[in-house]
Amino acid sequence: MLIGGLLLAMGLTSSVLKRSPVTPAIIYLAVGLLVGPTGLHLFHFNPLKQAALLEVLTEVAVLISLFSAGVKMPAPFQPARWREPVLLATASMAVTVGLITLFAWYALDLPLGAGVLLGAILAPTDPVLATDVQVRHPGDRDQLRFNLTCEAGMNDGAAFPFVVLGLGLLGLHDLGELGLRWVLADVLWASGAGIAIGVAGGTALGRLSLWLRRAPHRHDLMDDFLGLGLIGVVYGASVMAHAWGFLAVFFAAVALRQTELGQARTSPPATVSEGSLVFKEHLERLSEVVLVLLVGGSLFLNSWSWQAVGLALFLFCVARPLSVWLALLKQPVPLHDRSLTGWFGVRGIGSLYYVMYALQHGLPEPLALKLVQMTLIVVTLSIVLHGLSVKPLMRCLKEGRGLRLASAGSRG
């Protein structure tokens, strides 16, 4: 009833919400806090007891969002344009993990393994809650939006090696002698195989769908089913191959889009990527409603500790901006784009998935409770702080670019 009533209210007031200064996630969170233990205590969601359920819910939400992000990537593929998001998803994320590990060691008094695990949980940016700063449609050419979308698509998979490294330092995962197994299996093989499986699956479906749509076949295809089927096949194949499935799904969507537009002979072509995008975005919004409500319904007033708030502020104001600055140090990125990239490192559903993944792999309950509470507070503050700032900052950026174009035109 709660979710249904909220969906009705959001559907009836969608035009008003578009003009509102707050994002939908803030509204979902406020309702969750109101009816949860913080407010009326009409319901309480316990992440520790429901870890298996929450892991599945967040996993599905992230997979759908990664696919939606991947099919919006522009075609044709240009390596130079991908350099910045690749640096953000690798170098910036590694620096963020390191900075959070140091903060956890010195300020939170956590052991090294727990610090690395906490860094890995909070380092990846979120593809679900960051829709206001991401690519809006496949033809969107904005470089800032492209960088943030592509980064979120890649670093949700790139964080996995750090997650298992943290678990290994806690004695919950086999790292091998001197970490050799971790490097070979969890970093090189799992990442490379995940990308390869995704590219192969997306390319194959793109070619097959175009072949079936052309004469003499002219088949009508169910694009929604094909999109979901591609997610399931490449993710399942990655799990069986001990590869990172998040990377596989994102790159499957990218390869699908690139293949369809690269081989299309009609204008505009009928494509699986665009045909299934609207359905995926609806699923993405539905998952956002459910999961953000659960976040609000998981928090008590005493969940708010100075340690958790301090961690969130350190992440938003120090670790994220510094890591972005270091990663893009030698890249020709304008100062305003660099600043906004450093600020909009939205944390959300991906972080929830990783902390539930750790719980399911034997994390001790006292440490699990601490990490869960810190993650929930960081996600909550990210929803509020980034949600309140996204519309005015993106509006200022748009107006600033318009003034620069007008000035350049007048000089010309």
Image (cartoon, rainbow, N blue to C red):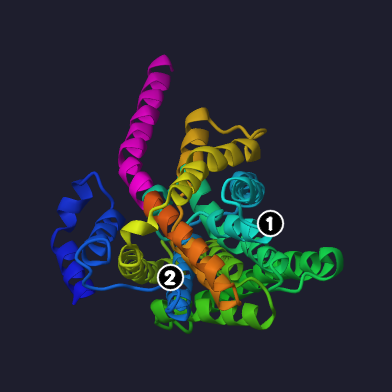
Q: Earlier in the sequence, mark 2 or mark 1?
A: 2
Disc on res. 313: none
Mark 2 and mark 1 in contact? Answer it, CB < 8 Å. Answer: no
Image position of 358 (left or right of 12): right
61 relative to 33, above or below: below
Name which residue type carries label 2.
Ala
Give the distance between the C-alpha atoms of the residues marked 2 and 1, in whole angstroms.
30 Å
**231 vs 301, nearest the viewer:** 301
Q: Is residue 177 visible?
A: yes
* Residue located farthest toward the right when viewing the structure as drawn: 177
Look at the image and tell me in which quarter the N terminus lies.
Answer: bottom left
Q: Is residue 57 magenta?
A: no
**385 vs 369, nearest the viewer:** 369
Residue 160: name its quadrant.
Answer: bottom right
* Residue located farthest toward the left when viewing the structure as drawn: 12
Residue found 39% across the figure and 67% down from its top:
277
Q: Which residues are magenta?
A: 383-412
Residue 151: x and y in percent read 55, 52
Disc on res. 61: 2
Look at the image and tell me in which quarter the C terminus lies.
Answer: top left
Residue 287: x and y in percent read 35, 70
Residue 182: x and y in percent read 77, 67
Residue holding disc 1? 112
Residue found 51% across the figure and 76% down from its top:
231
Q: Is residue 396 magenta?
A: yes
Dot 2: element: helix
Q: Is residue 66 visible?
A: no
